[in-house]
Image: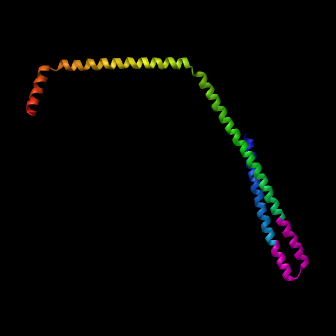
Amino acid sequence: MPSMEKNLFNLKFAAKELQRNSKKCDKEEKLEKAKVKKAIQKGNMEVARIHAENAIRQKNQSVNFLRMSARVDAVAARVQTAVTMNQVTKSMAGVVKGMDATLKSMNLEKISALMDKFEHQFETLDVQTAQMEDTMSSTTTLTTPQNQVESLLHEMADEAG
């Protein structure tokens, strides 16, 4: 595909070159018109006619260069579209291959079994956490003398009224 990109570059370059040639012909046309004017002022009608013919030829040449430039530019646009579509196609082919590999590796039975195992482990973790919290609260309750807690509560209640 690099050759297509090279061709695309060459086409765009050719279109620009044709546009430059068209502008060059426009300048030449203006110069010839000026020469026509000078020849008429000098009264030399034969030379004026020759310069007028040259001016018209330059104008026609300019239009032809522009026309060719437009056509080459249209071809370049088509080539650009082809290059872009080729790149998109290659990218899509890579994605499809990747998706195929992923879909082949996805075993629904394994995924379902894995999710069931996860749920079971999560439930087990909940039970163990609840058991640990109960054990911790009963341990803290046992280490603190209950009669001291009760007397502190009565003391605070008396102070509060």
Image coordinates of residue 38 in percent, x first then y, are 83, 79
Image coordinates of residue 63 in percent, x first then y, are 81, 62
Give the residue at the far right of this rendering: 46
Question: In the picture shown, does residue 159 fall above or below 120?
Answer: below
- Which quadrant holds residue 55? bottom right
Q: Is residue 50 magenta?
A: yes
Name the residue nearer the viewer: 160 or 37: 160
Q: Residue at 76% across / 60% down in the picture?
A: 20
Q: Residue at 49% across / 18% down in the picture?
A: 114
Q: Is residue 133 magenta?
A: no
Name the residue nearer the viewer: 134 or 2: 134
Image coordinates of residue 13 in percent, x first then y, are 74, 53
Give the residue at the far bottom of this rendering: 42
Q: Main secondary structure of the magenta part?
A: helix
Give the residue at the far front of this rendering: 161
Q: Residue at 80% across / 68% down in the picture?
A: 28
Asked if residue 134 lies left or right of residue 97, the reply is left
Q: The magenta stretch spans which residues?
A: 32-59
What is the count of numbered marks?
0
- Which quadrant holds residue 138? top left
Asked if residue 93 lies left or right of residue 149, the reply is right
Name the residue nearer the viewer: 60 or 128: 128
**Dividing the image into 4 quarters, which one contains the C terminus?**
top left
Asked if residue 83 lies left or right of residue 55, the reply is left
**Dividing the image into 4 quarters, which one contains the N terminus?**
top right
